[in-house]
Image (spheres, helix red, strand yellow):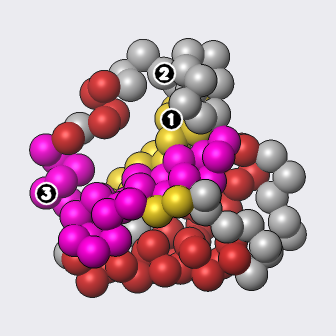
Amino acid sequence: MTPKNGEELTREIARLAESKKGVEIISIDLQKISLIADYFVLITGNNERQVDAIVRAIKEGLGGKSIEPTRIEGEKGSRWVLMDYGDVIVHVFHREAREYYQLEKLWADAPQLELLS
C-alpha cells in the first residue's frame, strides 16, 4: 500500500521504525499550528547503530514505494537524523540527543497522532 496522505505516511514511517526496534515513537500533528509540515515523527534509537538501521529501514521501505525524502541531514553522526518527506518530517534521535533537545516540550501545545497499538 502506498501512503495517500500525510497521516498514512506518518503511520507507515512509524511501522518501519518499529520494525527496527525504534522506541518512544510519537507523531506531533502540526496541521493547525505550523506551516513547516503536517506532522513530525519522533523516534529514538538506543545507539548510533540502531539510529542508522531505523533511518535505512525508512529510506528503503518508502523508496520501494517511490517515496523519496527531499533531503536528509545528520546521517554521519547518527545522533539526530532529520528526514524531510514534505508533509512529514522525521526525527530519528540517539537517546541522549532526544533527552537533550526535548522537541515534545517545544511542541507541547500540538496534538499527537495515535500511532501504534
Crowding at dot 1, Cα within 10 Å, few <14 / some 14-19 / many 20+, comes out as many
Residue 101 position, x and y percent, is 20, 41
Q: CA distance from mark 2 to mark 1?
A: 6 Å
Does 36 sit left or right of 24 as displayed? right
Question: Which sits in the foreground, 11 or 53?
Answer: 53
The tag on residue 110 is 2
Q: Find out whether the residues at labels 3 and 1 contact each other: C-beta distance under 8 Å.
A: no
Above or below residue 106? Residue 42 is below
At label 3, the amino acid type is Glu
Above or below residue 40? Residue 64 is below
Residue numbers of the magenta segment: 73-100
The N terminus - image quarter: bottom right
Reading the image, the residue beneath label 1 is 28
Q: Find out whether the residues at labels 3 and 2 contact each other: C-beta distance under 8 Å.
A: no
**Which element carries disc 3, helix, strand or loop?**
helix
At label 2, the amino acid type is Ala
What residue do we see at 53% from left, 47% from top?
89
Question: Which sits in the foreground, 59 or 8?
Answer: 59
Q: Is residue 93 magenta?
A: yes
Residue 13 position, x and y percent, is 60, 62
**Which element carries disc 2, helix, strand or loop?**
loop
Reading the image, the residue beneath label 3 is 96
At label 1, the amino acid type is Ile
Residue 20 position, x and y percent, is 45, 79
What residue do we see at 38% from left, 25% from top?
107
Q: CA distance from mark 3 to mark 2?
A: 23 Å
Question: Which sits in the foreground, 115 or 42?
Answer: 42
